[in-house]
Image (tube, grey):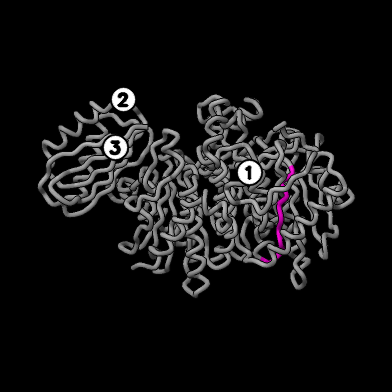
Amino acid sequence: MNDKGYNANFINRQSFIELDARERATALFDAGTSRELLGPFDRVESPWLAMQGVTPQEDDGCVVMKGKISGQAAVVVALEGAFQGGSIGEVSGAKMTAAFDLACADNERGIRTSAVMLLETGGVRLQEANLGLATIAELMGSILALRKFAPVICLTAGTVGCFGGMSLAAGLASYVVMTREARLGMNGPEVIEQENGVEEFDSSDRELIWAIHGGEQRYATGLADALIDDDTLQIADAIRRFVSMGVPAVHRSSQVALYRNRIAKLDTSQQWDPKGFRALWTTNGSSEEKR
Amino acid sequence: MNEYTGVRGTVWFRAFTGQASPMPGDPKSVLTADAPLGNDHARFLCVVPDSHARFPCARHGEVGLEEAATLATRVREVIEHDKNTIKRPIVAIVDVKSQAYGRREETAAIFLAAAAAADANGSARLAGHPVIALVVGHALSGAFLTHGYQANRILAFDDDGVMIHAMHKEAAARVTRRSVDELEKLAKEIAPMSYDIRDYAKLGLLYKLLHVENPEKPSQQEIRNVESELIAAIADARGGPVDLRNRLESTAARETRKASILVRTKLAAQWLEN
Amino acid sequence: MEQIEFNYPAKRKVPKRAHVGVVGSGDLEVLLEPSEGEVAHVFIRTSVDGFRDTWKAVLDRFFTKYDGAVRIQINDAGATPGNVQLRLEQAVEVSDR
């Protein structure tokens, strides 16, 4: 608060969510250091969409940028949630995977190169079904190889969130950064309702949706590493912090015993109150829970 | 004919290992056993239906929290055990209906459990273990990403009971606002959308398509044949790089995944420019 | 899916290329690049068929004010004429900056 009685930072806040994928990616780099690879003018688009009457986008909904973050080499891949729900097709998936493989090769050559993936996606693009699914598997393989050398940071800000097969990519990340508006989960409310009924998940219950998939819940249950306001400067700052932290001592997805034990202890005889669930799964646990 | 029956996994697990049990303390839905395979001692893993599973949404062959966590545990065990010795093969026998769709699953982060299982398999592969997936039935979406899709080599049977896809027909039709008939028609022209395993094979992701007269009742000879194919796949995996590049280098891939190959070539060229 | 082409006379050399927009529902992306010769070429790909006349009207109006020798590519997913106009103007603004 300044002497005028308002928080100037809040007034000047720039929403990150309102930015498109290209703008979001650019915002994370040190000023003037980023350049886009395979941009729209390279015209590498989906070979499968036009034949189905769906208008392709020239970057296939995936932006790849290379540059510096905190003076260090970094690659950022950003999915455009407004194009086909950010879904993964042959080309968008290949762009992400190739970018991470190239970053990995640079790391092997001694050039420390971190990676950030901005995931606004419902998962596989059904118009490309098996090629979408296959590229997600390949991307996961590339994340596993790259994250040994440098952090692979997942940033999901909303409004689409990160669902489907791509939630596994988020699960493999070194760090996960979310906003309150963002959501992260394997299956969205609609598909759960379709498969197992409205009692299992009422997809019209917005409060329930965010209580389970939302950034605040994920952060409170130790599944996200940071919960940031929808503010471009703060988000960029958080990314810089995680780049500087480097590779974590152990990745969340490798902590199998911890999560296996937590799952074994769950009382499955009823649904759980999401807030109550936070008491069961916290980042600060007893000594057996320590990372 | 196309439907998931949930019996093939157990049939083939027993065929290779002589048993069909979980390891002590494991849920009944995950079968794990070590058995000879050629000159190796391989670990076989399979997810099967368990109508008494603790989680109500994982009782019909779905890969849920416990299944993913168990798979991750049993694969990590192999990595740890073989740290300073010969890397044993890991064979995923795949017949999985789907991932588990439930509120409990989402609350308890099934996405992470799934990632943990994929992590274990991918890490095993990167450490030098030959990881083989044998798709004997269904391999859908998140379930396949969890169990099988990190393999060095993927083999599948060529019959109608085998299906690899991102979403079941009815659900896919609903989401893309088409009728199932329209979807099937489209799928015939567009290889990546097809539900037919023979079209999937055109994508170049499979190491081999195998023929077995009746995968639910294989003959002893057929079992021995499939074992030989697994052994060949293991040798092939050991002879190549530990990454997944073979999926783009196959003859079929060079035809149907031209765009993927173009992306990699162009991106590599632009990466170096300054 | 329809492909529509138009050509307009154009004299002015244009300083740089521009890309704006997203192929979201009701939206479009515009790629604008300098072209050779004294012509402006417009290529449209749209998932909404049957509106050639509407496209022509919007572009005729646009080119009464714009004289750049350009190649414009539009990937459209059902934008209104107003949105098309907006994106074209945005592209020009970036290109002439």
Q: CA distance from mark 1 to mark 3?
A: 37 Å
Residue flagged by tag 1: what amino acid is it? Gly
Q: Which mark is residue C68?
A: none
The image shows residue B206 at horizontal and vertical percentages of 64, 51
Instruction: Answer with left or right where residue A112 lies relative to residue C75.
Output: right
Q: Quadrant of residue B165?
A: top right
The kind of secondary structure element at disc 3 is strand
Which residue was labeled with disc 2? C50
Magenta-drawn segment:
B127-136
Q: Main secondary structure of the magenta part?
A: strand
Q: Quadrant of residue B242?
A: bottom right
Residue flagged by tag 3: what amino acid is it? Ile
Q: Name the chain letter of the residue that bears numbered label 3.
A: C
Which residue was labeled with disc 3? C44
Q: Name the chain letter of the residue that bears numbered label 2.
A: C
Task: Using the image as rendered, state which of residue A16 and residue C91 is in the foreground.
Answer: C91
Q: Select label 1 or label 2 by which is in front.
A: 2
Q: Is residue B129 found inside the magenta-colored segment of the image? A: yes
Res C84 visible: yes
Residues at discs 1 and 3 in contact (Cβ within 8 Å): no
Which residue is located at x 64 percent, y 66 percent? B240
The kind of secondary structure element at disc 2 is loop
Task: Using the image as rendered, state which of residue B139 and residue A221 is in the foreground.
Answer: B139
The image shows residue B138 at horizontal and vertical percentages of 70, 40
Q: Select label 1 or label 3 by which is in front.
A: 3
Residue flagged by tag 2: what amino acid is it? Gly
Query: Is the N terminus of chain C in the top left, top right, bottom left or bottom right quadrant?
Result: top left
Which residue is located at x 52 percent, y 32 percent? B186
Res A220 visible: no
Which residue was labeled with disc 1? B142
